[in-house]
Every structure is written in C-alpha cells, then in structure tokens.
C-alpha cells in the first residue's frame, strides 16, 4: 500500500547581539484541521488560502493532531499566542511566502524575523491563514514546538524558515 505523507520542517535561529545562540531544524505537526483543508481542496469542496502567516507561542504545550485555530490560537488559546508587547512586528502575524513546489517540496522564500520587545520564554510557532493576532477563525495549517524553549531577552531575534514536503511510499 502506498502512503502519501505531508511533512513540515521548521528551521529556527535564536540570535542575540548578532551571534547565533541556538539553531535547530525539526518537524512540525499538521493537525487534522490543516490536513482536512488540503484534502477538501483536492476534491473541490473548498479552496486553499493563498496567503499564510506565522506567529510564535509562549505556552508550554505540545501541538496535537486535534488542535484547531479556534482552540489553540489567540491570547486565550492553548498555545498562548505572542502579543504586540512580546515581539516586533507588532500589529499582525507575519506573512510567509513560498516558492513554487518542485519535486514534492516548497520552502518559504522569506526568512521570518521576530524581535523580542521584552524578556520571555517562547516554546514554538504556527502557520495559519488569518493575519490579525488573536484571530481564531482561520485554519491551523501546522504548528511546531521547538526542541528546547527559548528564553529570549529584549532585542533577541528568532528567525524562522518553513519547508513543506510531500512524499509517497
């Protein structure tokens, strides 16, 4: 039996005073909400969003298959989405753009950069299709808990690059 698998890979760097303190590259989870949106788009039942956004979270949680934008995102969601006082850019989630898929893979063409506005601990990030922070009406495409929590100081930078790959085996 052949299987089709969707993998997400996050590359993050934690930078302080121009020096990389930590970097990692690891798989994310694509919850059922994200998988269902992709599959329903294949059958023509819905359209896929054309714009995606990234944000970070500060709750000590591990993303799960059953997570949705409605339950996980926003300041009161289980992820504890970072707010304007936490990181720049402040007003909205940051748009992530992807190059054209090739050989079953596509990577963000922009490195997302978050600059800490205060000292805090960050546990991970997520990709959704709605721009306003605290919006819970969108689709949670994927989420990533970092391999280790990042204790950031004011002016530290967290850089994120995301790659999605589909494989058939």
Image: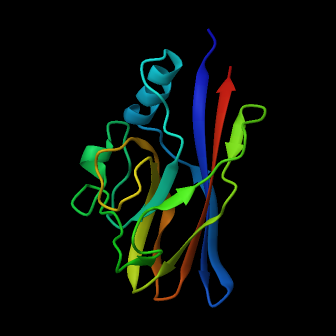
Relative to 25, residue 149 above or below: below
Relative to 137, residue 87 above or below: below
Residue 115, image x and y in percent? Answer: 51, 79
Name the residue nearer the viewer: 129 or 68. 129
Quarter of the figure with residue 79: bottom left
The residue sitting at the right extreme is 103
The residue sitting at the top extreme is 1
Q: For the N terminus, give its image quadrant.
A: top right
Residue 74, image x and y in percent? Answer: 28, 58
Name the residue nearer the viewer: 72 or 23. 72
Q: Is residue 102 left or right of residue 2?
A: right
The residue sitting at the left extreme is 76
Total residue callouts: 0
Question: Residue at the location (42% across, 18% down)?
Answer: 45
Q: For the C terminus, give its image quadrant.
A: top right
Question: Residue at the location (45% across, 53% down)?
Answer: 126
Name the residue nearer the viewer: 64 or 47. 47
Question: Residue at the location (32% across, 64% down)?
Answer: 59
Residue 7, image x and y in percent? Answer: 59, 38
Relative to 38, residue 107 above or below: below
Quarter of the figure with residue 105: top right
Instruction: Please say which color scheme the image uses.
Output: rainbow
Question: Residue at the location (59% across, 27% down)?
Answer: 5
Relative to 140, residue 11 above or below: below
Residue 102, image x and y in percent? Answer: 77, 35
């Amino acid at each position: 039996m052949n299987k089709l698998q969707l993998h997400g890979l996050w590359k993050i760097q934690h930078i302080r005073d121009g020096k990389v303190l930590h970097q990692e590259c690891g798989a994310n989870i694509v919850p059922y909400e994200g998988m269902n949106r992709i599959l329903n788009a294949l059958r023509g039942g819905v359209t896929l969003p054309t714009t995606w956004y990234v944000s970070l979270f500060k709750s000590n949680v591990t993303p799960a298959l059953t997570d949705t934008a409605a339950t996980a995102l926003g300041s009161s969601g289980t992820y504890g989405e970072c707010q304007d006082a936490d990181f720049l850019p402040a007003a909205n989630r940051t748009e992530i753009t992807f190059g054209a898929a090739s050989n079953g893979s596509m990577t963000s063409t922009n490195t997302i950069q978050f600059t800490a506005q205060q000292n805090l601990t960050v546990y991970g990030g997520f990709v959704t299709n709605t721009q306003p922070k605290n919006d819970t009406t969108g689709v949670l495409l994927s989420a990533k808990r970092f391999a280790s929590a990042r204790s950031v100081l004011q002016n530290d930078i967290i850089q994120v690059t995301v790659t999605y790959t589909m494989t058939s085996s």
